[in-house]
Amino acid sequence: MKSFVIKYDDDNCAIIPESFAEYKVENIVTGNDKMAEIISISQRIAKSDVPVLITGESGVGKELLSELIHNSSNRKKEPFIKINCAAIPDSLKESEFFGYESGSFTGALKNGKKGLIESSQNGTLFMDEVAEMPLDMQSTLLRVMQDGVFVRVGGVKEIRSNARIICATNKNIQDLVKDGLFRSDLYFRLNVIPINIPALKERREDIPLLTLYFLSYFNSIYNSNKKVSKEVIEALKSLDWAGNVRELKNTIERLVLISLSDIITIDDLQYIEAICSKNTYVYYASQELPDNTPSKPLKDLVEEYELEIIRKSITKYGSLRKAAKALGVTPSTLSRKLSNH
């Protein structure tokens, strides 16, 4: 896979490539050698039916990689069922996974219901956050993987399954096994093909590429023509990205939406960071504030920047009403904010 080399125009803004095809496989965009190796391995093992365990921090793209494996396999025309094990209450996990027969419990459907494993017959079942599965469910899942059979809740008839199982987690399952929270036999069964996706901070050369990819995408979505300055690109490369690619994507969308000019500046990025901090999302910037930055509470700094945006908007659009429309608020809201400031 080709390495990405960023180019800049006369305004010192990053030039968005006309096409990202040479850096894209399915929905995975990268110019990193380690990611290219992971993609290659995933495509090779896709033709088999062995279980796959994908590990990595939240937001690195575990679901996208599972989709790549399914779409590269002989099962690509069959169902691809996704489930987040942490999102289902423990009391419902068994019936959701294995289904149930009529009258199994109060509120059960008259004709019973297929579970996720049965619904993914001949296809692929992607189980995200598999480490959140209770121990009793783990033993039942192990039987499905070993013998290819399961029984619906309230039923007695064994149902055969040939669904391929792909699991993912952001936790260290080996530690959970040591602590008795995850079955060792299930871990070894799942860990036939282990794949670990590196965090974004471990492949920083992907940050400019992904930034421009998401910028191009959101420009299209919001019918805008935003560019991003070199200063912003360098700042983005220096961040830790605890939320990885997902966090970067969300950040670029916010920048497209809040920037008043067609060039996204470092001021826009700092404003985003301030807003996120105000809402308990903490982003760690490696760049120090300038020496002349006033020592004020964050609330006061955010309010001052908000006032600056309002003033610039009124100047740009010529009236408070038009500025309010551009900012997506009512004129009375802008008027009140001006009065408060």
Image (spheres, helix red, strand yellow):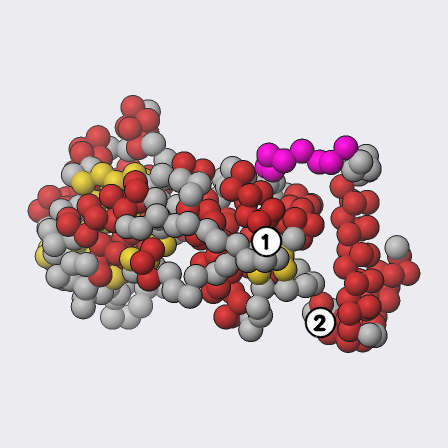
Q: What residue type is labelled 2?
A: Ala
Residue 287 in magenta?
A: yes
Q: Which residue is drawn at 46% across and 47% down?
A: 207
Q: Nearer the viewer, residue 159 or 234?
A: 234
Left or right position of 250 against 87: right
> Can you give x and y, in whole percent of width and height, for residue 340 in the image?
89, 57
Q: Name the residue under label 2.
A: 326
Quick one: which residue is furthest to the front in this view? 10
Q: Using the rendered image of the protein, determine whether residue 85 is visible from the camera's viewpoint.
A: no
Residue bounds of the magenta highlight? 284-291
Left or right position of 315 against 119: right
Q: Could you tell me which secondary element the residue under label 2 belongs to?
A: helix
Residue 56 in magenta?
A: no
Q: Residue at x 77, y 59 (%)?
A: 309
Q: Nearer the viewer, residue 258 or 204?
A: 204
Indicate whether 205 appears above or below 11: above
**Splitting the image into 4 quarters, where does residue 326 fall?**
bottom right
